[in-house]
Image (spheres, rainbow, N blue to C red):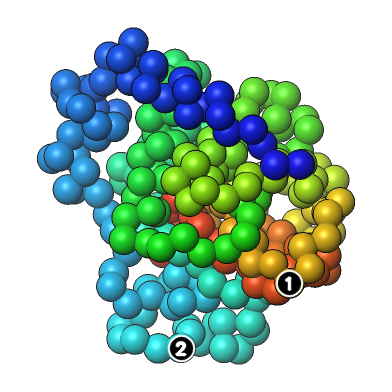
Amino acid sequence: MPYPLSIFAFLDPLLAVLLPRTCLLCGTQTTAALCSACSGDLPRLPAHVCPICAAPLGAPAPACGACLKLPPAYDATHAVLCYAFPVDRMVLNLKFGHHAFGRRLASADFFAACLLAGMSPVGNVIVPVPLSRQRLRERGFNQALEIARPLARALHLPLDISCLVRVRETVPQSLLPWRARKNNVRHAFECCREFSGQTVIVVDDVMTTGATLDAVAQTLKDHGAARVINWIAARAVRRIT
């Protein structure tokens, strides 16, 4: 079912007044999540990327070699930042840091703002990549959902947090070799909703091999989705060999 967004629209301006705003990276006083100096130094993806998986390309092309050879279930990927220092620290703090609720919101809002810059609304519904029940209990929140909330508000799209479920506890992808990740998440997701003919925007924090997102997209397409577009906070650009 779509997530009620009105409470967050009410809380956002209140939190902005009550919580002191300092740069998430250097701690200096600022009116935004990052000061202008830190924001300007963030590693960003190059101008030319694969439209399907967002891997960097030397020149414009319909797709990278990997996507041409073995097309994934998802149709496109939108990302702006590279998963490299200090973006990797920001993502890890969002996922595992026990910092204040307000700073977690600030991190998620910043990633959402980066994704929204220059983009027009596209899609019918937003679906965050779910955590397993065990991992959600351990962490207390889903970082993908934290990023998806401000995106849904800005794009005026429904946010569905219950249609997609991770039904199998998997080894964290970050602990596995890149080539082993596809098998790790195979049949890990189930969907309880039909998306007949719709375009689904899937939100996650980091994309490396794309194995998790491929499994999610296949599940959504098995339930009628016409297109699946990934919106990712940070894209790892390590070369797969």
Q: Please, what secondary structure does the residue beneath circle 1 have? A: loop
Looking at the image, residue 75 sits to the left or right of residue 21; the answer is right
Query: Which disc is residue 62 wearing?
Result: 2
Q: Which percent across, then down, holds residue 178?
A: 60, 63
Disc 1 crowd, CA 10 A, few/some/many (<14, 14-19, 20+) = few
Looking at the image, residue 109 sits to the left or right of residue 31; the answer is right
Looking at the image, residue 187 sits to the left or right of residue 237; the answer is right
Q: CA distance from mark 1 to mark 2?
A: 24 Å
Please tell me which residue is depicted at 46% across the width and 77% down the height of the picture. 51
On the rendered image, what quadrant is the N terminus found in?
A: top right
| Amino acid at pointer 1 | Gly
| Amino acid at pointer 2 | Pro
Q: Which percent across, then down, holds residue 99?
A: 44, 18
* Among the 4 quarters of the image, the one containing residue 112: top left
Please tell me which residue is depicted at 62% across the width and 60% down the height of the picture. 124
User: Is residue 209 in view from this perspective?
Assistant: no
182 or 57, nearer to the observer: 57
Looking at the image, residue 63 sits to the left or right of residue 1; the answer is left
Q: Nearer the N terminus, badge 1 or badge 2?
A: 2
Looking at the image, residue 133 lies above or below residue 116: above
Q: Which percent across, then down, holds residue 139?
A: 63, 26
Please tell me which residue is depicted at 44% across the width and 46% down the height of the picture. 154
207 or 201, nearer to the observer: 201
Q: Please, what secondary structure does the residue beneath circle 2 have? A: loop
Which residue, given by chain and number where applicable, does mark 1 sit on? 197
